[in-house]
Amino acid sequence: MSTGYLLFFLTLLIFGGGAVLALAWAISSGQMENLSADATSIFAADEPIGEMTDMVLADRKGEP
Amino acid sequence: MNAPLEAAARPVDRELVALERARIDASARKPVLFFFGTALLWLLFGTVLALAASFKLHTPGFLAGHDWLTFGRVRPAHVNVVVYGWSSLCGFSVIVWLMARLAWAEVRYPSLLLAGGVLWNLGVAIGTVAILAGQGTSVEYLEFPIYVPPILVAGYALISIWSIVIFRDRREKEVYVSQWYILGALFWLPWLYITANMLLFWFPVGGVVQASVLWWFGHAVMGLWFSPLGLATAYYLIPKVIGRPIYSYYLGIIGFWSLALFYVWLGAHHLVGGPFPAWLITAGIVGSLMMFIPVGATAINHHMTMIGHFSKLKYSPTLRFVVFGAMCYTAVSVQGSFEALRDVNLVTKFTHYTIGHSHLGLYAFFSMVMFGAMYYIVPRLTGWEWASPRLIRIHFWCAAIGVTTYVVLFTWGGWYQGVQLSQPDSQGKAVPFMEVVRYTVPYLIGRSVAGGLIAVGHIAFAILFVLNLMRYGTRRQGPTLLHETSSPVEPEQALATTAV
């Protein structure tokens, strides 16, 4: 029983502390500063904004 | 926004970046295809178990002659096969592929990921045989006997550590919201799984505390493992497929951190009516209602991103499955929040309503998003396009109509089952239990029909997957087809055109 409670509080400390550290890292490393840059980071010259990247079902009716 | 992101980027830039992207995709090919392939095998096996369990509820004599095929073994085998086999292995695939793509980093030593996948599959196989052999623990979602979790944890450690190594190697310094969700999921699963196993089996807590540990795990594993992976995929694929950045990155971040803050409290709402301190259950209910914040943020974000682009659902199988899944995420979350209320819980607890709710979450939301991910990822890894648009349509409509029928039937039937169980009839007498059981039979038969439809969709998808691996169909056009044989591009040269 006591080992169980010890484990419980230990994991609470490790994982709760981990979450706080992650948030602190995100703020200090500037992840919260330029949100529009984050949003466009998935696009690049080969797959730019404005182009669809999946049209497998387009063959029947032509491209959108 | 930088010039390279515009459609008018110079052709040479476009080709260089495409080659770099192809090289990164190729580095993830073996582990991701292995995870997807084995996940699909578990899905087919899980579907057979599901149909067997479903038939038994309205035709009790079905397959009743063998003890290893009795309901008490088939049902937990189904649950564990789809949770740890199908869903988690799909989750590993999207973790590795998305992490590599978003980090612009190659997967180094993919054989270590493969080894992790082999261990994970071995654990699921041993655990499933053990459940069917009657060695299940009878603790819901943790039915694998206690010698299986160490195998799963060893496999998971290899996969998760290697995924974090990809993140550490990242050349794209902006952390996209999908990466937040993936990192969160990688961090939360071992916490939940190891703690629950320790407190329930290795150093068992006593009495009713066991139930609170179980439901802390049972509920949080859905919201802190599967939901983040489904949302990470949706947050990447919806904007990527339609070619439009997410409507509000800010809402995405709010959604992530509020999920992280509130979700872990939710499990206590499973204990409504049980012998627990009132504050514990109330905390669970409050946490459940606070989920309107992350869910509302996510729903608004996805909907506003899609506005003006819904016509693209006609052309992209990925978009169809992912948008269907994302809509069901909103539905299941709102339903879950209301289900936590004491008055609602009084009716729905211990009824088929709950089973409908769980399938709305793990199938209509998570599995549909994973299907969408497979439609997008697999051709980029094999270099071959899907062989048959007709089979894709069969898969989508069977799955969508099947699961919608399933959920509607059990939501309606389960609610009135609960009303009859919890409230007296018009003459003030308790409704006889067998009468309530007979009332549910048509809904149970309907569920088997819906399950059959879902199974047809799975068979169609399995055929598509095998055909793709066997290179039937058309070859994909463009540099994303290139594999290890392609001449590597200098990363700096390619990345110079991708920096945002």
Image: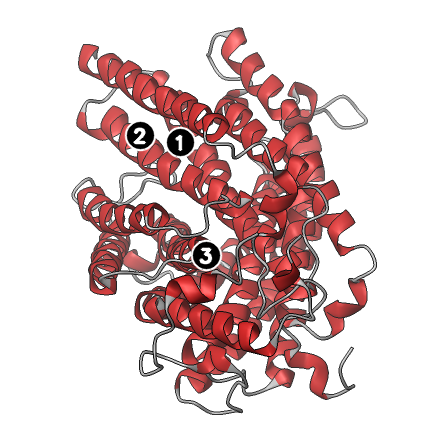
Where does residue B27 sit, x and y in percent of width and height?
A: 33, 68
Whether callout 1 and callout 2 share a subunit is answered yes
Q: Is residue A54 visible?
A: yes
Helix, strand or loop at disc 2? helix
Label 1 neighbourhood size at 10 Å, few (<14), some (14-19), many (20+)? many
Closer-to-camera residue (B207/B439):
B207
Question: Comparing marks 1 and 3, which lies closer to the viewer?
Answer: 3
Indicate the secondary structure of the residue bearing disc 3.
helix
Q: Amino acid at mark 3?
A: Leu
Q: Chain of mark 1?
A: B
Query: Is label 1 in contact with label 2 (beta carbons under 8 Å)?
Result: yes
Q: How is the image coloured?
A: secondary structure
Q: B352 or B392: which is nearer to us?
A: B392
Chain of residue at mark 2: B
Q: Position of residue B278 (x, y in %)?
A: 53, 8
Image x and y of residue B107, in percent: 31, 61
- Asked if labels 3 and 2 share a chain, the reply is yes
Circle 2 is placed at which residue position? B196
How far is mark 3 from mark 2, CA to CA?
Answer: 28 Å
Q: What's the CA distance linking mark 1 and mark 2? A: 6 Å
Residue B237 horizontal/vertical position (percent): 59, 59
N-term mark: 1 or 3:
3
The answer to whether residue B225 is left or right of residue B413 is left
Instruction: Indicate whether B58 appears above or below B380.
Output: above
- Which amino acid does the dot numbered 2 rest on? Ala
**B117 in relation to B224, above or below:** below
Q: Which mark is residue B98?
A: 3
Mark 1 to mark 3 CA distance (whole Å): 26 Å
Check disc 1 and report the residue beneath it.
Answer: B217
Residue at 49%, 43% in the rendered image: B175
